[in-house]
Amino acid sequence: MSQARTVAVVVGSIRKDSVNRKVAQALAALAPNLKFEFVEIGALPHFDQDLESSPPAEWVTFREQIAAADAVLFVTPEYNRSIPGVLKNAIDVGSRPYGQSVWNGKPGAVISVSPGAIGGFGANHHLRQSLVFLNVPLLSQEAYIGGAYALFSDTGELINDSTADFLRAYGQAFSAWIEKILAETPAKTA
């Protein structure tokens, strides 16, 4: 058995009681062959290329956390048919300086979560558009989780069996995807 791959989890909602974070935590519990590390984005200063000559410590830490992971999972709500500004900022911070993107070649997956019926379809596709440009090989299995508030108990426990089954299968597919992409990626030299 190979060692568990590390997945950096970037949650696009910074709410204290975020249903997106609950979904990410539920997936982490249902995919024991992956090691999920949540990377916080709420305190990242807005990207400003003028700061790149002496980047804020938060940018440096964020970039190091993403770079150290084997893969990245994005879990996002939908705001106005797109992704939250805080998530777009994190993507921009990680994509710079030019030519040194921490996203480049890193296996990825996207889950969009919404209390509405279509599960954040617009956000999912806007995020995918940016990630394709940044050369993040994405799991093609799309994941839209709608009606999200009804999926969890008052204590934050996932109580919907079909969603648990879906997340379990998604975690297995993502794990296989990570192995496939990493096997195809030439080893980086120091």
Image: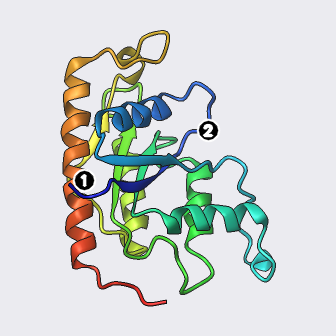
Instruction: Give the left or right position of residue 116, taking residue 17 as reference.
Output: left
What is the x, y in percent for residue 47?
70, 66
Q: Counting residues from the N terminus, which is met first, the one under dot 2 or under dot 1? A: 2
In the image, is residue 3 above or below residue 149?
below
Mark 1 — residue? 175
Residue furthest top as drawn: 154
Helix, strand or loop at label 2? It is: loop
What is the x, y in percent for residue 139?
25, 58
Mark 2 — residue? 14
What residue is rendered at 49% in x and 89% in y?
A: 190
What is the x, y in percent for residue 95?
55, 73
Helix, strand or loop at label 1? It is: helix
Q: CA distance from mark 2 to mark 1?
A: 26 Å
What residue is rendered at 40% in x and 16% in y?
A: 152
What residue is rendered at 40% in x and 74% in y?
A: 133
The reply to whether residue 145 is visible in this rendering is: yes
